Amino acid sequence: MARALRIQFPDAYYHVICRGNAKKNIFYDDLDRKKFLEQLIDSLNTYEVILHSYTLMHNHFHLLVQTPKANLSEFMRRFNICYTGWFNYRHQQCGHIYQGRYKSLLVDADSYLVELSRYIHLNIVRAQGTELTLYDEKWNLLHNYKWSSLPGYLNKSKTKPFVNYDFILSVINGRRAYKQYISDALQKGTRNPFEQQLYGCILGSKTFIDKIRKEHTFEGSTQEQPTYKKLLRRSIGAESIIACVADVFAIDKVQILKKRGFDPARCIVAESLYRFAEMKQKQIGRLLGNVDYSSISNMRKRFKRYITEDKEINMFFKKILKRLNKPYSLFKI
């Protein structure tokens, strides 16, 4: 099974998450949480890792960290081993407490760090589902939850010495602005930033990804090679794909973006955006007139029918592939 590629370089930012094995709790009480934070602080100091945000839930945790020494793997290995050993000793059990390897997402700090910090802090509210409906209930839960870095972002008197609040607060222009940012999310809702991730390991703009490709090389196991190859293969911009399809079909781009239905041009665009622009189906749906995920899935199914059953559409599609410099052999219909 292919594993997520670990991309490490000095001063990289990561969102890290570990879940309990079989969704079991990794914290049974506050003593577990206190020991977890002690182990975390010790590992932060040992590896000189900077912690920007965190939240501890019952069966998982979130960290937003920066690694000046490009040592996320070493940091997480030591930290997880230490807490696992202590947890098993205290609760008289043995074996893994986490569900496989930790998951890490390389983060474009310029584009996503503040939003991701908010997402991490709102976890405790999301975990309540529909149990909390009133704004005041949600706000009080967030404000009083002590196993999160949020209280220090809202109130200077509640800061903790092992969390770096300054960077995110400087980006958003202070605690008052961050407080409003959280309040707006509780009232209006937020998007899920993880829908924007690419290759299963990066959350960043196209410029950020191009910079990663240009400035860093990665060595990984054979299990990581599929992701590595995808990362090296440059994606095509959505605008270029839409313009190309519109030109070949001799139609206006507006017809592709706004028109409803499953006409051939829209179906080819949907499939091409998924294949060549590395876009997720929800993203494609928003671009093609705010249609839902299932509509994009149906478009991609129609696409296969079009190019196998309609010779003219198949010829158009081959022209599009030629202009995009993509071989027809990529499509095993």
Image (cartoon, grey):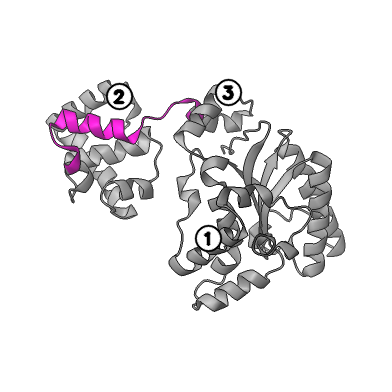
Distance between mark 3 and mark 2 Cα atoms? 25 Å
Regarding mark 1 in the picture, which secondary structure is present there?
helix
Q: Is residue 189 left or right of residue 281?
A: right
Q: Which residue is mark 2?
A: 324
Q: Tell me which numbered mark, 3 or 1, is placed earlier along the sequence.
A: 1
**Quadrant into which the C terminus falls:** top left
Question: For the residue marked with disc 1, what is the amino acid?
Answer: Tyr
**In this orientation, which residue lies closer to the viewer: 135 or 307?**
135
Q: Residue 304 appears in which quarter of the rendering?
A: top left
On the rendered structure, is 126 left or right of 294? right
Q: Dot 2, how many residues are within 10 Å of its Cα: few (below 14), some (14-19), or many (20+)?
A: some
Mark on residue 55? none
Select label 3 or label 1 by which is in front.
1
- Do callouts 3 and 2 mark residues in contact (Cβ within 8 Å)? no
238 is within the stretch colored magenta: yes
Local crowd at mark 1 within 10 Å, few (<14), some, or many (≥20)? some
Numbered circle sitting on residue 215: 3
The residue under the point 31% across, 54% down is: 294
> Residue 243 falls in which quadrant of the image?
top left
Q: Confirm whether the magenta stretch covers residue 142.
A: no
Q: Is residue 80 visible?
A: yes
> What is the spatial separation of the Cα atoms under label 3 and label 1, in whole angstroms?
34 Å
Q: In front here: 223 or 154?
A: 154
For disc 1, the marked residue is 181
Q: Is residue 163 above or below residue 28?
A: above
Specify the segment rendered in magenta. Answer: 230-254
